[in-house]
Amino acid sequence: MLIPMTTPLALIFLVMLVLWLATFLRSAVGFGDALLAMPLIALLVGMQVATPLVAWTGLATSVLILSTSWRQVDLRTFWRLTLASLVGMPFGIWLLQHGDERIVSLLLGLLLMGYGAYSLYRPTLPALASERWAFPFGFVAGVLGSAYNTSGPPVIIYGTMRRWPPDLFRATLQGFFLVSNVIVIAGHGLAGLWTQEVLLLTLLSLPVLVTAVIAGARVNRRIPAAQFARVVYMLLIILGAIFILPLWL
């Protein structure tokens, strides 16, 4: 069934608007699009459409960003994070089946808020000198990603503690998210979520994503490294609150 027959044009416009804002955020700072887009798009078209749509647009966003910034990717760190996350994924599946999602969400939210607040008030937080720290952070990302689709926070914390400059931070995250999205999308396909409505919405979103990535890239280049770190820390606090807030509703 085609989108014009099932989804009003006004609703399509709202979905595209949310995707533009979410993609602009990710292009500017490297992350945050899914946490912004998922709840809003789910309210508009339902979770069965929102989940695969955000995954597809996330993949497209990674490709668009990397098409111009792939040279800034820290390949050694990228492979360490990716391989470690693959090791962690089976543990995440076990956690999904046997763990308490409320407890995990609470702990993750407190970790993000605590680290973000501490970093804002203590800018001299010790940096991670060794790249070997990519393995434990990547492992935790794999666990959380396969369990609750939240692989980003551990990698974001790792990048800030490694003192990555904005361009390297943004590009390396996209490489990691690219692999994660491919795995997630494959799982959606096996689950039968590649509906015609999802695929058509994805195609309609491509021009929207291109303009959002271009606008976000311009902002990214103009943010000084020190100011960029403060923006990331504040976003971590907001993301932590997003994890915790639903537990009290």
Image: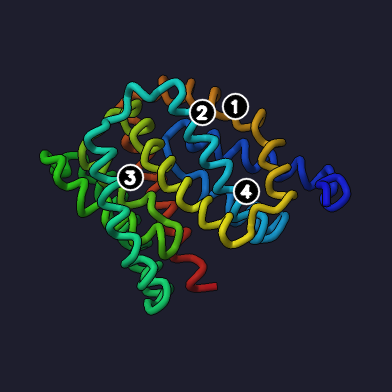
Q: Residue at x 15, y 40 (%)?
A: 131
Q: Are marks 1 and 2 in contact (CB under 8 Å)?
A: yes
- Alpha-carbon distance for marks 1 and 3? 24 Å
- Alpha-carbon distance for marks 2 and 3? 20 Å
Quarter of the figure with the C terminus? bottom right
- Alpha-carbon distance for marks 2 and 4? 16 Å
Judge the density around disc 4: few (<14), some (14-19), many (≥20) Cα neighbours within 10 Å.
many
Q: Residue at x 65, y 52 (%)?
A: 194
Judge the density around disc 2: few (<14), some (14-19), many (≥20) Cα neighbours within 10 Å.
some
Q: Which amino acid does the dot numbered 2 rest on?
A: Leu
N-terminal of the pair, mark 2 or mark 3, is 2
Q: Are marks 1 and 3 in contact (CB under 8 Å)?
A: no
Residue 179 at x, y = what percent? 41, 43
Q: Secondary structure at mark 2?
A: helix
Residue matched to label 2: 64
Residue matched to label 4: 53
N-terminal of the pair, mark 4 or mark 1, is 4
Q: Which amino acid does the dot numbered 3 rest on?
A: Ile
N-terminal of the pair, mark 3 or mark 4, is 4
**Disc number for residue 156:** 3
Residue matched to label 1: 210
- Alpha-carbon distance for marks 1 and 2? 7 Å
Residue 117 visible in the shown view: no
N-terminal of the pair, mark 1 or mark 3, is 3
Q: Secondary structure at mark 4?
A: helix
N-terminal of the pair, mark 2 or mark 4, is 4
Q: Residue at x 58, y 62 (%)?
A: 191
Q: Which amino acid does the dot numbered 4 rest on?
A: Leu
